[in-house]
Amino acid sequence: MNQRTIEKAIAITGIGLHSGQPVDLEFHPQPVNTGIVFERSDIVGSAPIPASAFLVQDTMMSSNLVFGGTRVGTVEHLLSAIAGLGVDNLLIKVSASEIPIMDGSASPFVGLLLQAGFVEQEALKKFLKIVKPVRVEVDDKWAELHPYEGYELNFEIDFDHPAFDKDFQHAQLDFSTQNFIEQLSEARTFGFLQDIETLRQNNLALGGSMDNAIVIDDARILNVEGLRFADEFVRHKILDALGDLYLIGYPIIGRFNAYKSGHALNNMLVREILSDESNFEIVTFDDNVTCPIEYLPLTGLIVEG
Ligand SMILES: [Zn+2]
């Protein structure tokens, strides 16, 4: 299995969640072993920012990268799309300090990347294979990765709130591109009305609306269209985790389990794994060995709806 990049450059414009201002986003193909790299197109001569867990500086509401004083925020939904489609090498140019929020899910990025198309490159795709269980905990929250022949993500949330059905607070993704697109990519972020009002008073979340988030008050979901999945909240948490975990630098072979985790804990887990080389191996799959993770072929990827 070889590395892949996109076939042609492509661009889109969205709104910054915090600024409320238009943000331009461009995707460009990159050579083998480049990885995922961000660049601020609004700052002339600014250094590229690699998508690395070690550059995550604040995780208040999203995962934010800071390198040499330059910031790119809210990278997780885009990284989730990139991980889901198995893209190894990509340059992302962004005209502001945050990736546009789009509809609050990964789906618009998936659509755009599919439109750009993919090319197979002349180097084997590298995976990070978990060989020892690693766990991090903060208070009652925890996240762990275990050895597993595939990539499975299990997540449980625990909201005691009328809008959160007790029966739909845990979910599992058996990772493949197809499962990612169908089961995860459209799950939207969510927020409580009270928190959004506080953020606005601090000049944050100015672009936030029911067009890009599920908004919940004391009793119910305010979006008239309701949920896209009965368990959309926890599916979104898996979407976030997939993006946060891609900051490890490779697709993962392992089983992820998490309870009430978020961007901070996901990042702590990645750093913990990378802190000890005996936790993992970097592996490749040539023609003679079957890869335990299934990506769709380069052509014929179809998104419904
Ligand atoms: Zn999210």
Image (tube, rainbow, N blue to C red):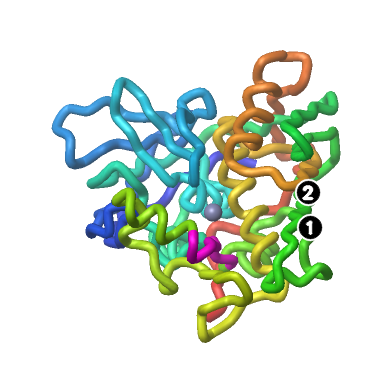
Q: Is residue 15 visible?
A: yes
User: Which of the numbered marks, if any, corresponds to residue 172?
Assistant: 1
Looking at the rendering, the quadrant in which ligand 1 lies is bottom right
Badge 1 vs badge 2, beta-carbon distance below 8 Å: yes
Name the residue tied to disc 2: 152
Q: Provide residue 8's location: percent of width, then percent of height.
A: 34, 54
Position of 52 with respect to 98 (left or right) is right
Secondary element type, mark 2:
strand
If the image is split into quadrants, where does the N terminus sit?
Answer: top right
* The quadrant where residue 53 appears: top right
N-term mark: 1 or 2: 2
Q: Nearer the viewer, mark 1 or mark 2?
A: 1
Amino acid carrying mark 1 in the image:
Gln
Q: Provide residue 274's location: percent of width, then percent of height.
A: 65, 20
Q: Residue at x 78, y 49 (%)?
A: 152
Q: Provide residue 210's location: percent of width, then percent of height.
A: 44, 73
Q: Residue furthest left?
A: 44
Question: From what the image shows, is residue 170 above or below residue 246?
Answer: below
Question: From what the image shows, is residue 230 above or below residue 284?
Answer: below
* The quadrant where residue 187 appears: bottom right
Amino acid carrying mark 2 in the image:
Glu
